[in-house]
Amino acid sequence: MRKLRGILVAGLAMGAFFGVLTSAHAQTPAYGQTQAPAYGQTQAPAYGQAPAPAYGQAPAPAPAPAYGQAPAYGPAPAPTYVQAPAPIIETPPPPVTAPKAPISDDMSGAVGVGVGVVAGNEFIKPDGAVAALRYWINDSLALAAQLRFTISTAKNTDTSWNLSPTAMILFSPKKVLSTRLLIGVGLGETTDKTPPADVTVGLTVPIFLGLEHSFARWFAMGIAMQDNLVNYTNGTNTYTFDISFNTTKYFGSLFFYTD
């Protein structure tokens, strides 16, 4: 009995020893690791490692304060710049030029009817009248037709008369000017009766030089001189032919043009 008790005591002692060893092996951490201590306890650090301090659990952070939403803004306007004024550059005055001649309307296509008074030997004494037609082909070229008729009577003598139609072409060297220089040449015919001679018929080549001023497109006044450069007359038994400037006539004229 006493031997059995000894065996039981020995078995209990060995069981307690093996329980202590098993508990110590379970609580020892692996190399390089630490075991979290129980809440409120600290564990001795492993060899060569700093003990991890045990802290109480940190309280939850306070919630962030709520603010109103920031107002939305549009894009900032682009800056405006005031342009610097351009520098003032003084320009020299334009050169002084002679005044230009007044400009007239283009006479292309205009048709005119005119009348003229022929001066006599004393220049101011009328020596017949001239009726004329004129057509402007363009502003520098015109066709003209003239009809001159003179008649004279004297006591105890026969009546003398002269009929001279003429066709000419006129050229104006300056276009669209209110005062035009007219230069012309043409062909004419004369029928003349001067008592006591019989009627004579002749051909002439007249030349024309004149100035005409247009007050408006429809109205113009002019002065001119005309001479028969070539004269050929044929009478009953005689004929004459001459080239001279001895038949110069001066006259003034009025012309009315259509639009």
Image: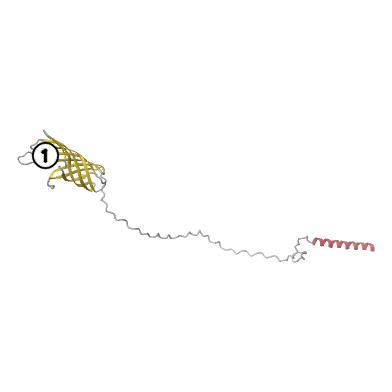
Quadrant containing the N terminus is: bottom right
Q: Position of residue 58 (x, y in %)?
A: 68, 65
Left or right position of 204 against 28: left
Left or right position of 134 against 28: left
Circle 1: element type: strand
Left or right position of 63 against 47: left
Check the image and report above or below for 31 versus 110.
below
Q: How many marks?
A: 1
Q: Position of residue 40 (x, y in %)?
A: 74, 66
Q: Coloured how?
A: secondary structure
Residue drawn at the location 22% of the way across and 45% of the way down: 182
Residue drawn at the location 14% of the way across and 38% of the way down: 163
Location of residue 134 (image quadrant): top left
Location of residue 235 (image quadrant): top left
Residue drawn at the location 13% of the way across and 39% of the way down: 162
Q: Position of residue 189 (x, y in %)?
A: 16, 37
Task: Determine which residue is flagged by label 1.
Answer: 161
Of residue 219 and residue 25, the one placed in the foreground of this image is 219
Of residue 129 and residue 65, the one placed in the foreground of this image is 129
Quadrant containing the C terminus is: top left
